[in-house]
Amino acid sequence: MPTIAHRLKQIYTQIHQAEHTFSRVPNSVQLLAVSKTKPAQAIISAYQAGQRHFGENYVQEALLKQQELSALAITWHFIGPIQSNKTKVLATHFDWVHSVDNLKIAQRLSSQRPNFLPPLNVCVQVNISDETSKSGVTLNDLPELILGISELPNLNLRGVMAIPAPHADFAAQREPYQQLVSAVKALNNPNLTTFSFGMSDDLDAAIAEGSTLVRIGTALFGARRKLL
Ligand SMILES: *Cc1c(COP(=O)(O)O)cnc(C)c1O
């Protein structure tokens, strides 16, 4: 089985190849290593190979790993669904939250962000293409939410995040991302520079459509036992 260091290298090769193929600026796509359900040792392996940004979905699990890895200079991203009773922990222990999809949660994150930390980086999760998913704001409601979040003092609004329904077909993978990017560009908001989309199975389609941050779990750490 290839090592995590080896797979990390392969993923960077794939990212750089896709940047080239789709005429993206070299090194304009960042890799977020999604380590949910994986042990701290897996994170250490990726860290030793140069990876610094890690994404987690479950608060309790993330806190345990953060404690174990507190000596490492990791930037922690939260990418899972947000329960309102977890906002204080998120505001205290993460550098980024990608899954903000309503103003109440955003207000709580802002008011609970400790003063000794810089503003919390946030992305708005947008629900594109998938009626079955309850997470994410609709494209219709996106402009109003963006305006509301922009007024919160302890949040730094960075961009948008999306998890479209899976498709095997390349053109079908590109379509929702294309929709999202054109909707965001139409807002003309200079703060919205992070496009957090693309996972192990649709990395190339995401980069083709303008992703600036791909969130990769399986291709880096191997299959997960639990779903999600
Ligand atoms: C699990 C997860 C990923 C990573 O998915 P893979 O298919 O394993 O690369 C990315 N983003 C979110 C929000 C996830 O929950």
Image: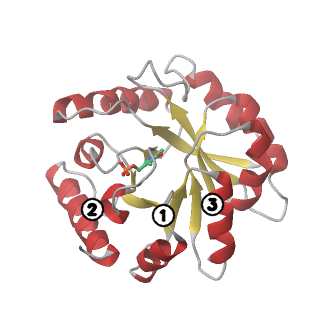
**Residue tagged 2:** 26
Kindly indicate the quadrant of the structure image that contains residue 50: bottom left
* Label drawn at residue 228: none
* Label drawn at residue 62: 3
Label 1: element kind: loop
Label 2: element kind: loop
**Residue tagged 1:** 38
Q: Tell me if 172 is positioned left or right of 217 in this view.
A: left
Mark 1 CB within 8 Å of ligand 1 = no
The quarter in which the N terminus is drawn is bottom left
Q: Which residue type does callout 3 highlight?
A: Ala
Mark 2 CB within 8 Å of ligand 1 = no
Residue depicted at x 51% and y 69%: 39
Residue depicted at x 37% and y 28%: 182
Kindly indicate the quadrant of the structure image that contains residue 46: bottom left
Asked if marks 3 and 1 touch (Cβ < 8 Å), the reply is no
Q: Tell me if 4 is positioned left or right of 65 in this view.
A: left
Q: How is the image coloured?
A: secondary structure
Residue 219 in picture, x, y percent from top left = 30, 59
What is the C-alpha distance between the residues marked 3 and 1? 10 Å
Label 3: element kind: helix
Q: Which residue type does callout 1 highlight?
A: Lys
| Sequence-earlier tag: 3 or 1 | 1
What is the C-alpha distance between the residues marked 2 and 1? 30 Å
What is the C-alpha distance between the residues marked 3 and 2? 32 Å
Few, some or many C-alpha atoms within 10 Å of disc 2 (few <14, some 14-19, many ≥20)?
few
* Of residues 150 and 36, the one drawn nearer to the viewer in this rendering: 36
* Of residues 131 and 151, the one drawn nearer to the viewer in this rendering: 131
Few, some or many C-alpha atoms within 10 Å of disc 1 (few <14, some 14-19, many ≥20)?
some
